[in-house]
Image (tube, grey):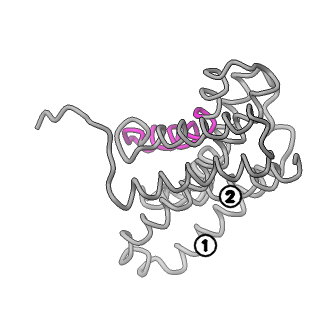
Amino acid sequence: MEDVMFVLELIGAAAFAVSGAMVAIEKKADIFGVLFLAVTTALGGGVIRDVLIGRIPPVMFVSYWYLLISVVAALAVFIDAYLRSEKYKLHLDKLDAVNNVFDAIGLAVFTVSGMNAAMPVSDNVILVLFVGMCTGVGGGMLRDVMTNTMPKVLRKRVYAVASLIGGGLYYVMHVLDINQLLSVGCGMLVIFALRLFATIYKWNLPSVKLD
């Protein structure tokens, strides 16, 4: 199962790196800015997770596979946008939709990954869910703050809630001793589906309208 989680984490890192790179390009960052924001988006949540559970140094500074896959994914996005900048500008709406898909993949993978890391440390469900949520949304929050944007997790599209619901399902299945691969798959699928449906159907939590 460790090998499966490692592969899933690499996929999640690549997905979040693509998401971060696309946001950076939209904000007119240079190549260093694109790479830095992509890596922060991809690995920031994992660093937060490791600090919360006392894993020092964080995994990203021990295993360079995560950093490598993030940089490669971000470079691919940058080169594609650089060579096709005119088409890129014409299809920003479609690119935003693509970005949401990659963002949902990263959220799903890293929520469950974060919970997996927290479970051996504590059987406290609140702690496990909190670590999972922070792992899933942490990189995206750092990305949004760095681009001077109100973090999505605080304002739109059922972001952290999707993480908590899918994470809750995974935790229940884990406690019931259901096959781990099935539990991981179900948890991730629920998070991914909720995040996408929230984007497509514009689901938002209630907020106070002051304008």
Q: Position of residue 203 (x, y in %)?
A: 33, 50
Q: Is residue 175 above or below residue 78?
A: above
Q: Position of residue 10 (x, y in %)?
A: 76, 54
- Identify which residue is drawn at 59% across, 60% down: 18
Q: Nearer the viewer, residue 101 or 139?
A: 101
Q: Tell me where residue 210 sits by quadrant.
A: top left
Residue extending furthest toward the left: 211
The verdict on residue 145 being magenta is: yes
Marks 1 and 2, the one that precedes in the sequence: 2
Task: Name the residue: 38% across, 70% down.
Answer: 92
127 left or right of 85 in image: right
Q: Is residue 101 left or right of residue 48?
A: left
State how far apart marks 1 and 2 are (Cα). Answer: 15 Å
**Residue type at tag 2:** Ala
- The residue identified by callout 1 is 79
Q: Quadrant of the C terminus?
A: top left
Residue 79 lies, with reference to residue 69, above or below; the image says below
Residue density around tag 1, few if under 14, some if 14–19, many if 20 or more, within 10 Å: few
Q: Nearer the viewer, mark 1 or mark 2?
A: 2
The span picked out in magenta is 133-151
Percent coordinates x, y for residue 2 in the rendering: 88, 46
Q: Nearer the viewer, residue 14 or 67?
A: 14
User: Which residue corresponds to mark 2?
Assistant: 14
What SS does tag 1 mark?
Answer: helix
